Image (cartoon, rainbow, N blue to C red):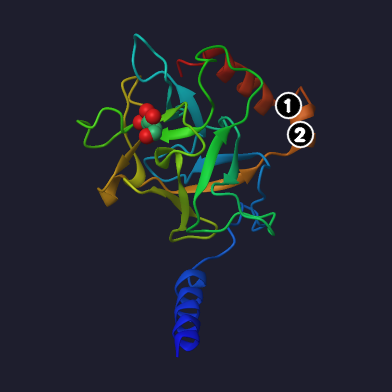
Amino acid sequence: MKTSFLLTLLLAAAVCCTHGIEEVKDSNGNPVKIGAKYFIQPVKTDTNNGGGLVPAAINILPFCPLGITQTLLPYQPGLPVSFEYYPVFVGTDYISTSTSINIKFESDVWPVCNELSKLWAVDVSSSAAKEPAIIIGGERTAQNSSFKIEEATGANTYKLTTSYGTVGTIPGAWLSAPQLIVTNDVAKTLFVKFVKVNVDAATTATTSSSRLEKLGLRMFPFY
Ligand SMILES: *[C@@H]1O[C@H](CO)[C@@H](O)[C@H](O)[C@H]1NC(C)=O
């Protein structure tokens, strides 16, 4: 009696939690790997130039912690990120939808706010903000650094969610470049693709895209 009740519970749990979970795919349709580098690129539309995501000052002083904005430079791929599960999952090398992850910027060039981590977090410290900013400087174990990737309409297209709402954008303080916030307004949802960083291309220093990357880094953190 007790055993069958337990079995029912276990079965119910298995049905509940595997349903709707899929491997996240990069822009080429390959599974997104734990710890590998990807550009998170907003989907290009009539009103969105498709530039990548970059760390950027969202306050003038003090400007740490940094926020995240979409660069106004078209063709600039942004700064790479990597994904890790938290709590840690064993037995897979790949990232799934609807599962808690940390998102971290990956860059050797990081001239400011070095005392903070490079993990994304929802700034819930100022509870007054209805649409809290996404900032850089999270803690792995904190709920405010927990994100999920969810499928969206379109091939290999996703949105990011948190327990506080969905990741979206508002015009930021700096030239109105779209700034990442958490919102419950679906009109502001940010739709993205994950573009795998091509290590070979990154080491070929003379392409026009790497020149733009250097230009972008020179402007950091004021895009
Ligand atoms: C996130 O949560 C932790 C633990 O509650 C807290 O110490 C930290 O200040 C929060 N960070 C932000 C950015 O809200």
Q: Amino acid at mark 1?
A: Thr
Q: Residues within 10 Å of mark 2 (few under 14, many from 20)?
A: few
The earlier-in-sequence mark between 2 and 1 is 2
Position of residue 156 relative to residue 131, above or below, is below
The residue labelled by disc 1 is 207
**Image marks 2 and 1: residues in contact by CB distance under 8 Å:** yes
The spot of residue 140 in percent (x, y) is: 52, 37
- Along the horizontal axis of the image, is 180 left or right of 39? left
Residue at (52, 15) in percent of width and height: 115
- Along the horizontal axis of the image, is 152 left or right of 85? left
Which image quadrant is residue 72 in?
top left
Which circle marks residue 201 in the picture? 2
Question: Is 43 or 46 nearer to us in this picture?
Answer: 43
Q: Amino acid at mark 2?
A: Ala
Ligand 1 contact, mark 1 (Cβ < 8 Å): no
Residue at (52, 47) in percent of width and height: 101
Q: Nearer the viewer, mark 2 or mark 1?
A: 2
Position of residue 39 relative to residue 100, above or below, is above
- Along the horizontal axis of the image, is 89 left or right of 138? right
Question: Is 203 or 122 nearer to us in this picture?
Answer: 122
Which circle marks residue 177 in the picture? none
Separation of marks 2 and 1 at Cα, in angstroms: 8 Å
The spot of residue 110 in percent (x, y) is: 59, 17
Q: Residues within 10 Å of mark 1 (few under 14, many from 20)?
A: few
Provide the secondary structure element on which disc 2 rests. Answer: helix
